[in-house]
Image (spheres, grey):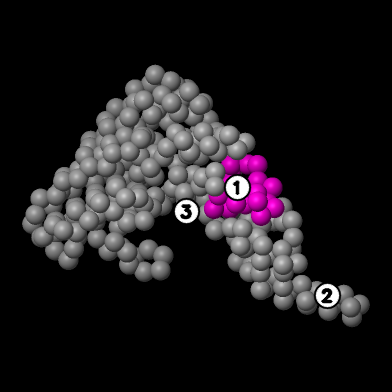
């Protein structure tokens, strides 16, 4: 999974109930702007400690732009699983080559298998100019080829923009699409929350809700615990603080008892 927007979303939740919208793309990233290829993107594969323990991760880095660092695993799509499977079949010393072709662009990678199930190498990235043009037509042109690379790694799709826009959500830039795609936010998720009674109109709130794993079951359980018709900001803040339906029910009983004593 692409980690950067997910972590950023969680960090911002502590400051506000909904995520602030990113600044509009630079004027230079207008329709017709050319996005050049990126050479020598580093990749590594192996066990990495993340979350609940070590997991096999395919990680991509930009040596000349040390800030770019993203990873994916078997849960990031059939194409990612196929790439990882090809790496795992290689024996130490074997040459490795694989490609990852998605709407936003294509990665062509080579490298070599190492000991202990690890492997490494480099990639070339070719952005899809037609994809960038389609985003520009929708008022969200990527800033540069790094944005295009990020969009590729999270498997961003034009259909995601169009279906969420049709639901009334507004994208302010390519960064919104990166976050939405990284978290797997789609129209079905928006319908689920709205169907559970959550009035969801801002894309930033939808992203925050997904990052915190708010779903119809949690909302229903909270309603049965005495908190029906939660506002979006309330739901996000409560979930961010780790409030469970059981805790909410017990606190409700305590407050009721205190009120009775008074």
Binning the other alpha carbons within 10 Å of mark 1 as few (below 14), some (14 to 19) or many (20 upward) gives: some
Please state the horizontal and vertical placement of residue 69, each as a whole percent of the image.
34, 48
Q: Earlier in the sequence, mark 3 or mark 1?
A: 3
- Mark 3 and mark 1 residues within 8 Å of each other at the beta carbon: no
Q: Earlier in the sequence, mark 1 or mark 2?
A: 1
Q: Earlier in the sequence, mark 3 or mark 2?
A: 3
* Residue 19 among magenta residues: no
Of circles 1 and 2, which is in front?
1
- Mark 1 and mark 2 residues within 8 Å of each other at the beta carbon: no
* Labelled disc at residue 191: 1
- Residue at left 50%, top 26%? 138
* Labelled disc at residue 256: 2
- Tell which of 105 and 18 is nearer to you: 105
Of circles 3 and 2, which is in front?
2
| Displayed quadrant of residue 147 | top left
| Displayed quadrant of residue 172 | top right
* Residue 206 among magenta residues: yes
* Labelled disc at residue 156: none
Residue that badge 3 annotates? 7
- Residue at left 29%, top 53%? 81
- Tell which of 210 and 35 is nearer to you: 210
Please state the horizontal and vertical placement of residue 150, each as a whole percent of the image.
37, 41
- Residue at left 32%, top 56%? 74
In space, the residues marked 3 and 2 are separated at their CA atoms by 38 Å
Q: Which stretch did the figure color magenta?
A: 189-210
Picture quarter with the C terminus: bottom right
């Amino acid at each position: 999974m692409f980690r950067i927007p997910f972590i950023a979303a969680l960090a911002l939740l502590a400051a506000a109930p909904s995520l602030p919208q990113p600044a509009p793309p630079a004027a230079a990233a207008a329709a017709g702007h050319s996005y050049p290829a990126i050479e020598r993107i580093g990749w590594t594969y192996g066990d990495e400690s993340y979350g609940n323990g070590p997991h096999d991760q395919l990680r991509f880095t930009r040596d000349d732009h040390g800030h770019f660092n993203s990873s994916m695993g078997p849960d990031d799509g059939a194409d990612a699983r196929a790439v990882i499977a090809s790496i795992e079949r290689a024996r130490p010393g074997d040459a490795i080559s694989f490609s990852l072709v998605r709407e936003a662009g294509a990665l062509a990678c080579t490298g070599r298998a190492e000991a202990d199930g690890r492997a490494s190498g480099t990639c070339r990235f070719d952005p899809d100019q037609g994809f960038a043009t389609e985003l520009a037509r929708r008022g969200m042109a990527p800033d540069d080829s790094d944005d295009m690379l990020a969009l590729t790694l999270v498997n961003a799709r034009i259909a995601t923009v169009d279906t969420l826009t049709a639901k009334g959500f507004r994208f302010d830039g390519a960064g919104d699409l990166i976050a939405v795609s990284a978290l797997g936010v789609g129209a079905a998720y928006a319908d689920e929350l709205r169907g559970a009674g959550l009035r969801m109109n801002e894309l930033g709130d939808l992203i925050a809700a997904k990052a915190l794993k708010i779903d119809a079951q949690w909302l229903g359980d909270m309603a049965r615990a005495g908190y029906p018709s939660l506002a979006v900001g309330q739901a996000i803040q409560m979930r961010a603080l780790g409030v469970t339906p059981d805790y909410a029910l017990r606190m409700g009983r305590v407050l009721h008892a205190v009120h009775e004593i008074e």
